[in-house]
Image: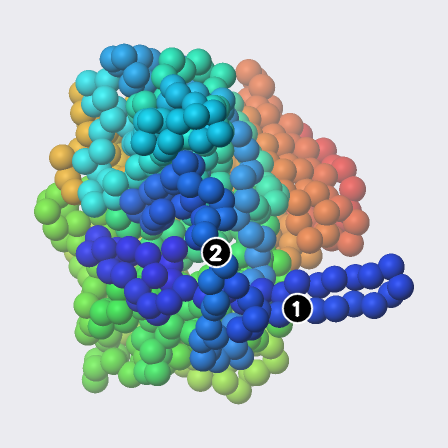
Amino acid sequence: GWYRGALTWDLRRDLYGEHLALLAQLELSYADGRTVLHGTDETWQARTGPVRSDDLYGGQHTDLRRPSPEGAPQPVRTLPVDLTRLVAPEGPPPRITERIPARSLTQREPGRYIADFGQNLVGWVHLADVPGPEGPSSPDQGAGPAEATSAVVRLRHAEVLADGELCTRPLRHAAATDTYDLPPGRSDLAPTFTVHGFRYAEVTGAGSLRPEQVTAEVVGSDLRRTGWFGCSEPLVNQLHENIVWSARGNFLDVPTDCPQRDERLGWTGDIQVFARTAAFLFDTGGFLSSWTRDLAADQHGDGGVPVVVPDVLRDDNTMATGWADAAVVVPWVLYERYGDRDALARQLPSMRAWVNRMASELDDRGLWTTGKQFGDWLDPTAPPEDPSAAAADVHVVQQAHLVRSAVLVMHALRQLGQDTLADHYEDLADTARAAFQTHYVSDGGLVHSDCPTVYALAIRFKLLATAEQQAFAGRRLAELVRQTGGTVSTGFLGTPQVLDALAQTGHADLAQEMLLTTECPSWLYPVTMGATTIWERWDSLLPDGTVNPGQMTSFNHYALGAVGDFLHRRIAGLAPLEPGYRAVEVNPIIDGPIDSAWAVHETPYGKVTVSWERDEDGVTQLEVDIPAGTTARVYPPSNRSSGPKGRFRGAVTVPAGTHSFTG
């Protein structure tokens, strides 16, 4: 696992220690009321089991011919460990959360099959009732071990096929192979100390297999589902389903970037952009709260934040814009969605430390231009060999995120009643914003590097000085989107903002059109290519069906699924107005090609439901149901002007209950 196993593309081992250890407590309760505790100490003993090796990337080798447990009990020794550093997890443990039977089982040659589960998932394959080698079932039947030759069953895993065979190139160094040495008789086979990311599995050595013997067991942190969405566009519904599956696959004790190759790391940039989507879909309060504590534990003394948490890379890159900002954004999202003031207060020192680190780098112009940066990572206009070479000037992106994080820290301090400190961060945000306006924005509103990401960030992070600049930025963003035919020309940091920026500046119809684009690169292109999860690259699978030749190609990577937040808040129209959904905002985009949408979310106060539908005459019916103890600010369809811009004339506030609006 994470403690001693091979991690990262360099297959580094023993990053946290050289010896495995067990901390356990056996509690015995007797009928007479006595309770006896037996904690792990030097009186315990250990024996070897059938698992010969295991690794997150490599897979597991299990020798079922060996007795379990094997050999005489051996003494153990105690390790000197500072137990005060151990804390209980706040989120649920990983479990098998679903079982999916093989959709098809294709025999490629005698004794070799490829199973297709119809869904890219994370977990392992369970093989039922597999026959062992021919021969006596035990030494008592007159034959020694040498006469009972063993059979070996091997399973390999992959997300996609190439010419009908597993395409394992995207796995890089990850062997993703489980091996079983079989005894006589029949066995059920499944690993216990590894997971794989796959849709397809190759099975060899298991004899004649039937589909009903082959099941994928889905494994992940057992998060309670809290959010659902649907609309009139089937491709968008599949996109949303893909987002859900990518979250399920990558939320396995740590929010990872991908679950299949030699990486699977807690990249801070990915969860920074995805946190709002995740918090709608699942109860991530404990899961992400635990992870933010890990982030604070790995944070450097100068406030710098590693690009992965847990910090297994251990390099000096602690200043990456949009990645390190997870220290601020994720705790704020948890407060916004769950209203947990104690968790916000706990993370506040970490939040402030990161913003202070950025502020310490400001030059005499008030600009932050230092540090190793990923920038608008994986901008589709960047060359494949240099995914950081985005169209957006990296210093513009840096300054924008400095302002945004300073503002969020200011809001956090005000929520916690620390107004004097809040004033300091408000001043910092004002200084950085003014420097942004002076050095990166023309009087007319042209933003330096003139590309969709810089306009989206300027609009969404409120970086423009005048209404005229805001209007120009919106028009220019819309013009750039139209020039590309509605395809995506933004990277990891710009993509989560671009649709909102269009809608915010009067181009909601274009935002819907962009969402529905199917040409590559777009959100729906992978759906048209059969994707069942979110891809790392828009073109992880090329239009001719071949796999992208790049070395960084994942078919399960939730970052670009951050669009789910836009689906929930603006297509369906359901968003928190006050922390923990104490008040709800209902503000769907009803002008555009989408004819209907709905969303349901289990808030801390109860279930909120929003749905709307536009009929053939253009009349829209909006239904809102909110729980007791809450209110909703609703933008009714009757309060919108006609035409594609859909401008509002006002909102109404309604109490708990069911409400209908027509317009």
Mark toward the viewer: 1 or 2: 2
What amino acid is at disc 1? Answer: His
x 26%, y 69%: residue = 314
Q: Which mark is residue 38?
A: 1
Is label 1 in a helix, a strand or a loop?
Answer: strand
x 19%, y 74%: residue = 370
* Quadrant in which the C terminus is drawn: top right
For residue 533, above or below residue 52: above
What amino acid is at disc 2? Answer: Ala
* Residue 243 in the image, given as x and y percentages of width and height: 44, 38
* Quadrant in which the N terminus is drawn: bottom left
Q: Which residue is mark 2?
A: 72
**Which of the 4 image quarters holds residue 509?**
top left
Is label 2 in a helix, a strand or a loop?
Answer: strand
In depth, the one of 192 and 105 nearer the eye is 192
Check whether the beta carbons of the residues at disc 1 and disc 2 lie within 8 A of each other: no
Q: Earlier in the sequence, mark 1 or mark 2?
A: 1
Within-10-Å neighbours for mark 1: few <14, some 14–19, many 20+: few
The reply to whether residue 5 is visible in this rendering is: yes
